[in-house]
Amino acid sequence: MAVIRKGNQAVLLVVDVQVGAVQDAWELSRVVSNIGMAVERARAQRVPVIWVQHSDDELVYGSPGWQLVPELVPAEGETRIYKQFNSSFEQTSLEETLAVLGATHIVLTGAATNWCIRATAYGALERGYDLTLISDAHTTGTMELENGARIEAADIIEDLNIVMTWVSYPGRSNTTAPAAQIDFTALGGNR
């Protein structure tokens, strides 16, 4: 059973909005703008912003594709987490960072919806955090399957928004909200 986090501290987690990870992402300009809005709100409300960057054989650490998109720039002192697996929690310092911050509520945004956002969302809930997925600030690309079928990016995004609205875990809250409605001061402590 997960440890249920006590307290009332939100953090904004921005996952994998990297040049090479989002080059074919659906409605990227709008999504990046919404992420930027969430980052500015978090900073204005003195909520920690944590930046996550993925690396693997295709997204090589330090390469141009590994860099965050130029529209999103971490501020001095904001934490950066480097990962090699879909979940931002696996073999990273994220849990320790959240513990130091006293985090109880993760507000999640980034890419790719069907891989790293989904895995991180479930990872957060399974570890006892409350979760808000910013419904219009995560993205992915359309999937073309070997059998010729396509799963449209918009459908993947809508699916995760629905799931994160209705999935339930004991002692935790989870929901979705558009970037324009995120109020970090109202998050957490709803147990």
Image (cartoon, grey):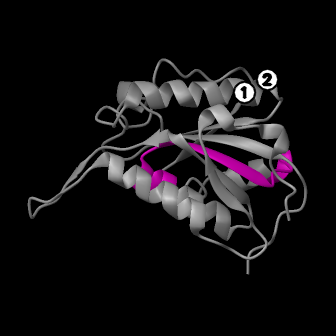
Residue at horizontal 43 percent and vertical 43 percent from the top? 55
CB within 8 Å, label 1 to label 2:
yes
Q: Nearer the viewer, residue 93 or 7?
A: 7
Drawn side of residue 60 relative to residue 147, left or right: right
Residue at horizontal 59 percent and vertical 70 percent from the top? 167
Q: Amino acid at mark 2?
A: Ala
Q: Amino acid at mark 1?
A: Arg
Q: Nearer the viewer, residue 12 or 181?
A: 181
Secondary structure, mark 1, is: helix
Residue named by callout 2: 44
Q: Which mark is residue 13?
A: none
Image coordinates of residue 21 in percent, x first then y, are 37, 38
Drawn side of residue 108 relative to residue 61, left or right: right
Crowding near pointer 2: few (<14 within 10 Å), some, many (20+)? Answer: few
Read off the magenta span.
99-117
Query: In the current view of this chain or complex, which residue is farthest to the bottom?
Result: 1
Drawn side of residue 44 relative to residue 179, left or right: right
Residue 98 appears anywhere in the view: yes
